[in-house]
Amino acid sequence: QVHLVESGGGLVQAGGSLRLSCAASGGDIVAYHMKWFRQAPGKEREFVAAHSSSGGYYYTHSTLGRFDISRDNAKNMVFLEMNNLKPEDTAVYYCAADAGPIRRIRDAGPVEYWGQGTQVTVST
């Protein structure tokens, strides 16, 4: 059982940056695809970024070039560096882990473990 805990959310002005962290315990993340999703009020949870267990990087169109996912397997942690934040990035951000197929890397369906989420609010 892998336990994920996010941190680093907060309030930031548009154009600013935040770095989210996800600390894993109860298991090593090296064998998992590590993902970030987000959910805004009244909207469905959506994919943000992923780093596959084989080292591939995946982003959604709206975050490509602005967000950067990374992991430190030795520390069992995953990070999401978010730059040039926009008000539409406001959401609860969730860390997730799974060992599903690469073709479903952007899907929430295969996710085995979720964090509790951290709020990111971007003001105008």
Image (cartoon, rainbow, N blue to C red):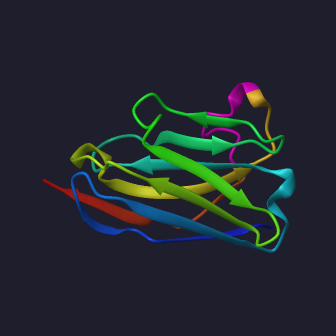
The reply, left or right, for residue 97 in relation to residue 107 is right
Q: Which residues are magenta?
A: 103-111
Going 76% across and 67% down the picture, which residue do you hit? 2
Residue 13, placed above or below residue 88: below
Main SS category, magenta section: loop
Going 78% across and 42% down the picture, which residue do you hit? 55
Does the magenta segment cover residue 79? no
Front residue of this view, candidates 27 and 51: 51
Does the magenta segment cover residue 108? yes
Where residue 99 sits in the image (x, y, percent)? 81, 44
Residue 36, placed above or below residue 43: below
Going 87% across and 52% down the picture, which residue do you hit? 31
Spot the residue most to the left. Answer: 124
Residue 63, placed above or below residue 24: above
Residue 17, placed above or below residue 3: above
Q: Split into 4 quadrants, where in the image is the N terminus? A: bottom right
The reply, left or right, for residue 61 in relation to residue 90 is right
Q: Which quarter of the figure has residue 45?
A: top left
Where residue 18 sits in the image (x, y, percent)? 40, 62
Q: Which quarter of the figure has residue 54?
A: top right
Front residue of this view, candidates 65 and 45: 65
Going 49% across and 32% down the picture, which residue do you hit? 60
The reply, left or right, for residue 48 in relation to residue 41 is right
